[in-house]
Amino acid sequence: MKKNIDIDSVTLTKLKIISALEDLSVKALMEKAVSFFVEHKEKEALDEMSVEEKEDLGLLLLMQQVDRNDIVSEKEFLEALNDVD
């Protein structure tokens, strides 16, 4: 999909120079810059989380990896709970 965006001439010149130095197209450079910015913001948000929030996020990620077709009987579940004590 092609979109037109308005960029002032100074910024466009800077983009062209950086893309030449990095041996990338201006489009690839902008995509790389946006990806870097998003990763930075995600890391920033993660760093600001409390320990409890990080644990909750970890649990959520583990729960998303669970095989929903893997079924455990009630007996096995209760035995596993008893083994934890």
Image (tube, helix red, strand yellow):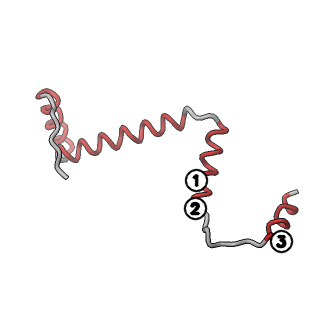
Give residue 64's position: percent from left, percent from top.
Answer: 57, 58
**Which three-letter amino acid code belongs to the residue tagged 1?**
Leu
Quadrant housing residue 11:
top left
Give residue 15's position: percent from left, percent from top.
Answer: 18, 36
Q: Name the residue under label 2.
A: 65
Instruction: Give me the C-alpha separation between circle 3 and circle 1.
Output: 27 Å
**Secondary-structure class at tag 3:** helix
Which disc, if any, is residue 61? 1
Which disc, if any, is residue 34? none
Mark 3 or mark 2, whichever is nearer to me = 3
Count up the numbered dots.
3
Residue at position x 27%, y 45% from top? 31
Residue at position x 48%, y 38% from top? 43
Mark 1 in CB contact with mark 2 (< 8 angstroms) = yes
Give residue 23's position: percent from left, percent from top.
Answer: 18, 47
Location of the C terminus by quadrant is: bottom right
Say whether residue 40 is left or right of residue 85: left
Instruction: Give me the C-alpha separation between circle 1 and circle 2.
Output: 7 Å
Say whether residue 33 is left or right of residue 44: left
**Secondary-structure class at tag 2:** loop
Few, some or many C-alpha atoms within 10 Å of disc 2 (few <14, some 14-19, many ≥20)?
few
Instruction: Give me the C-alpha separation between circle 3 and circle 2.
Output: 23 Å
Frontmost residue, 46 versus 6:
6
Frontmost residue, 79 versus 24:
79
**Which three-letter amino acid code belongs to the residue tagged 2?**
Gln
Q: Name the residue under label 3.
A: 75
Mark 3 in CB contact with mark 2 (< 8 angstroms) = no
**Secondary-structure class at tag 1:** helix
Residue at position x 20%, y 53% from top? 1
**Which three-letter amino acid code belongs to the residue tagged 3?**
Lys
